[in-house]
Amino acid sequence: MENRITEYIKSKLAGDYQIWFIVFVLNAFGLLIQFSAKGRMVMMNPMDPIFSFIKSMVILIFSFILMSWFSRQNYLKFAQYSHVALLFSWILILVAFVFGESKGGASRWLEIGPISFMPSDMAKLCLIGSLAKDFSTRQSNPEAYNWQFFLWLLIKIGITCFLIMLSNFSTSILIFLTSIILMIFGRVPWKQIGYIIASVAILASLVVTLEIGQRAKTVKSRIANFSNRVGKKDGKSVDKKDEDYQLYRSYYAIATGALSPKGPGRSQQRYFLSQAESDFVYAIIVEEYGIVVAIFIPLFFLWLMYRGANAVRHSGKPFGGLLSAGLTFSIVFQAFINMLVAVGAGPVTGQPMPMVSAGGTSLIFTAISIGLILSVSRDKEQETKDLKTII
């Protein structure tokens, strides 16, 4: 009986088991902290946290099913559709921008019945796959990185970043940083990387300066506020209801809970932080569990990055290595951006923490990304089997 159960688990959980363990721990802890962070809902309706918890459980179960399915697939199939999927994601972003429902001052969501869908999450995944495919076919031929390919890269990265920038500036920056990492791994000449960085930087500056799109004013305001905080350190009161109110509440949560944690479900700042379960979830973690437990969160993401890099090392195909690198760095970058914002080390961005923060679309596409990383990690298993056969 035990052998059957073991074989069944192995058949469903393909790939690196350390990655599976990391993902399980982060998601389980995320579910616990989300239930606590949404405690303010009790004041509106005592049943709201229960319904929200059930919804989160359903999404989490579905995400694990997706992750398991993608981990058992041949990741090379993803390369076949990455270019077309990226083009389709551009169309969806435009549709969301023009016709989507406005939330938080930006139209970045598509409503499909009861499901809310954010096309930018899809574009991030598709761009990584598309770039990995481009670079993997040019690893053995440095001359393939000519000016025509440079223009192709600039157009692909530029259009993706620009479209997302219109309604979600921070996600656009995250995607661009991931693209730079991929270009470095893909052995793109430094001169071309420099031109692309300069071009996208000029594009972003124009978008903000000319206030193109829905978030330009917000971006300018957040950059100015961050500069003032770093330069003046004026120490505003947490009771002052200005645009930094959420951030100073986050500071208060961290300061009061770091050395004297309040315990699970006992956070006070969850009642004041409007995004306690997503953008400022790390502050709630520190307030309830203390600095010791909070340190394990970044360590788990660093562990994930190490295992993702390990998959790169053992991948027998350039596309697999590049895909795993891009997806792993994207997830880890986003997690650290969320944590840095909570402690005031960067401008407020609105980026959720993967697998820990509440979210639907974000969790689904993170699950697909990890499923593909797990699929790449299976190359090591095949390498071990081949070695045993030779011996």
Image (cartoon, rainbow, N blue to C red):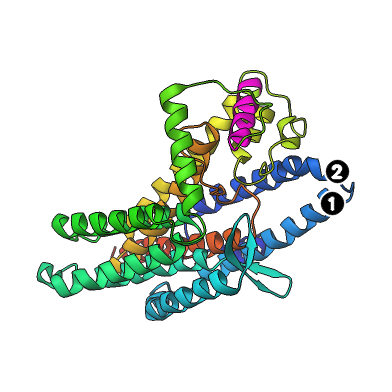
On the rendered structure, is 203 left or right of 16? left
Q: Is residue 218 at all visible to an observer of this figure?
A: yes
In magenta stretch: residue 255: yes
On the rendered structure, is 287 left or right of 125? right
Residue 155 drawn at (x, y percent) = 29, 71
Q: Could you tell me the amino acid type at mark 1?
A: Asp
Residue 351 drawn at (x, y percent) = 53, 49
On the rendered structure, is 197 left or right of 246? left
Question: Which residue is nearer to you in this view: 157 or 388?
Answer: 157
Q: Residue furthest right?
A: 46
- Snapshot quadrant of residue 232: top left
Q: Earlier in the sequence, mark 1 or mark 2?
A: 2
Q: Is residue 284 above or below residue 106?
A: above
Residue 363 drawn at (x, y percent) = 59, 58
- Snapshot quadrant of residue 314: bottom left
Q: Is residue 84 above or below residue 10?
A: below
Q: Is residue 239 above or below residue 321?
A: above
Tell me the quarter of the image containing the N terminus. Answer: bottom right
Q: Which mark is residue 42?
A: 2
Which residue is identified by label 1? 48
In magenta stretch: residue 151: no
Q: Alpha-carbon distance for marks 1 and 2? A: 7 Å
